[in-house]
Image: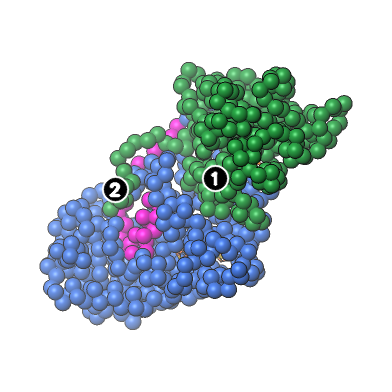
Amino acid sequence: MSRQTQCAHVIDLEGLQQLLDALRERGYRTLGPTVRDGAIAYEDIASVEELPRGWTDEQSPGAYRLRPSDTDTVFGFAVGPQSWKRPLFPSHQILWRAGVAGGKVQLDSEPHIDAPLALIGVRACELSALAIQDRVWLGGAAPDAEYRARRADAFIVAVNCAHAGGNCFCVSMHTGPEVTSGYDLALTELGTEGEPTFLVTCATEAGAAVLETLTRRAARDDEIAAAQAVVAHTAASMGRAMPETDWVSRLLVSPEHPRWNALADRCLACGNCTMVCPTCFCTNLEDTSDLSGLQVTRTRRWDSCFSVDFAYVHGGSVRPSIRARYRQWITHKLATWPQQFGTSGCVGCGRCISWCPVGIDLTEEVAALCAETPD
Amino acid sequence: MAPAAEFPVSQTAPEPLLPRVVCVHRRRRDAPRVWTLELQTAGEPQPPFAAGQFNMLTAFGVGEVPISFSGDPAAPQRLVHTVRAVGAVSEALVRLEAGAPLGVRGPYGKGWPLEAADGRDVLLVAGGLGLAPLRPALYQLLAQRERHGRITLLYGTRSPRDILFRRELAAWGTRGDLALEVTVDHATTPWQGHVGVVTALIAHARFDPQRTLALLCGPEIMMRFTAEALCAAGVAPEAIHLSMERSMKCGVGTCGHCQFGGFLLCRDGPVLPYALLRAPLRVREL
Ligand SMILES: Cc1cc2nc3c(=O)[nH]c(=O)nc-3n(C[C@H](O)[C@H](O)[C@H](O)COP(=O)(O)OP(=O)(O)OC[C@H]3O[C@@H](n4cnc5c(N)ncnc54)[C@H](O)[C@@H]3O)c2cc1C
Ligand code: SF4
Ligand code: SF4
Ligand code: FES
């Protein structure tokens, strides 16, 4: 923590507003948490008034409920259905357009240059998810130019979690709740009484430059200790945990485990889990043309391994059964992802558990798949 | 904050998913529903490719599909692809007439390990359209014939009408330095050759199992039986290579469609040794 505590300061809500203003003045589009349709959503925010002050959430398998908190905190909730994958890697993206006329084709692939993004309130597990997506989109032989541009320009204001959601298991995935890298500024909300105050630390020059412009004071030692106690308390109150077994190797040798049948009986193959997961990256490329056939557009859209069409080769799907598709999802996420990208595909955010309509709990399933593996 | 330094953010690579526009130079019908397209590249230099690699071909307004190179790797400027019409995109591709534009991006994937063929017997086993992705390997092997031991091509297809590259096969058949056996599932026309599955031809082939490199391309079931037969004949699973087919949308390892167990087949394959495929091929619906 030494580097962070060096620049540790304390700001209040006014300072937080100044932070939003400073980022917007610098040309950033500021995205942060706000209450939308009964859940926390990441939307454009210009004012601290839009933050979910006084709200918290209750999460359990198949359930997410936002309710007024007993306290007046600004970041007193865990992750909602959205993740930062949506602004960084939009759910549909035009790759190119082509004009087809007289046997000639004119390709147009103007990159979409958006305003740089400032992400406010990024949790530790979400920073891990960003690092995983970086490996997918930038680590291969053909790095994605648009993702690279968005990522390179993003300003990240992280938040240390003061509340563990009922489905969180970041501790067992070593991805949280404390933010350790990958951010510009990090906030820890101090205390639960009275006007909210935040301990701010910076990890980059860009972060330090913005911090300098805010009304702030140097943090006292007891405030630094209090901030550390906040994450320690959160770490001690995790909703769930992955089993303490080598699930990577167990899953790799368990494609015929009977538990997959039980799972297939419950799973609806709705794909919710893949949509809410901050690391799921599968996409489809679709071509559309106007009625004349002269204007062609190729769009990249989020896809899901739960759809039957996903593994379609002429003649049919390679994975017609839900059993095979569910097995693909978990096995990929937890066991084959490391082989493909040198990292786990799961950060323990618990979204897939909360948003599964039948309440399938990833941690429970992995425990069962590891425990009873027949030899 | 920008991503970690291991992912440089400043480099400006061309958009990897953007096709190059080329047009059909010549189109030849090889068999019912199968056409070979020779593409004209408007003087633009085409990247070199390795035998066994593939391109993503776009029929504008219809879609994009992976299609293997079927031409000679020594002449990458002559882009040749052999396509069987099985659905919307492949139908549209084979209907393109001379001069019609299409999109090409690639080459993608890992091809046949021909660097391992020196000093060894090479056994190529093709099923149906699987002959097309093997043809570039054969061109390359024959161009450096003296470097290899016995070369054998075993080719099985549905009926005599479905035999691809007839004239070339006939020419290869007269070479003294290539053993060629063709079999058909059903003999419709007067047919003097073998009838039956391609695995049955293995017994006719002369190769030293200890020093054989085997290259297999065709329907998955055919490749599995062939690979098992070769293992039974004493060829090591590490020396048997299969070209795998799965749905492929991007070709560059980011769409997730081509997963087969832990492999992203567009990136880690499509050609992989049987030693790595044997276990996953036994799992149904993997
Ligand atoms: C590495 C590799 C090399 C190949 N090389 C060759 C080759 O050299 N020559 C050759 O002829 N073929 C080759 N193939 C196979 C070729 O890619 C397929 O035949 C082709 O993709 C078929 O596309 P299609 O649109 O014509 O047919 P379809 O099978 O109809 O469609 C294929 C794609 O369209 C979509 N689709 C269409 N209909 C449906 C539906 N009902 N439900 C869901 N999705 C649907 C799917 O996304 C599917 O992936 C190769 C494949 C691979 C992976
Ligand atoms: S698999 Fe579930 S818990 Fe893991 S990162 Fe995805 S949504 Fe979060
Ligand atoms: S696991 Fe749950 S959320 Fe995922 S596809 Fe199945 S029913 Fe839907
Ligand atoms: S084809 Fe997209 S990941 Fe392989």
**Does residue A144 appear in the picture of this structure?**
no
Which x, y percent locates residue B257? 55, 48
Left or right: residue B95 versus residue A146 is: right
Magenta residues span A108-134
Q: Is residue A127 highlighted in magenta?
A: yes
Task: State which chain disc 2 sits on.
Answer: B
Which x, y percent locates residue A364? 52, 73
The residue pinned by badge 2 equals: B5
Which x, y percent locates residue A88? 39, 51
Q: Residue at x 33, y 64 (%)?
A: A124
Q: Residue at x 14, y 64 (%)?
A: A6
Q: Which mark is residue B265?
A: 1
Q: Is residue A214 highlighted in magenta?
A: no
Q: Quadrant of residue B90?
A: top right
Along the viewing direction, whichever of A358 and A251 lies nearer the viewer: A251
Q: Is mark 1 within 8 Å of ligand 4?
A: yes
Q: Is residue B45 above or below residue A178?
A: above
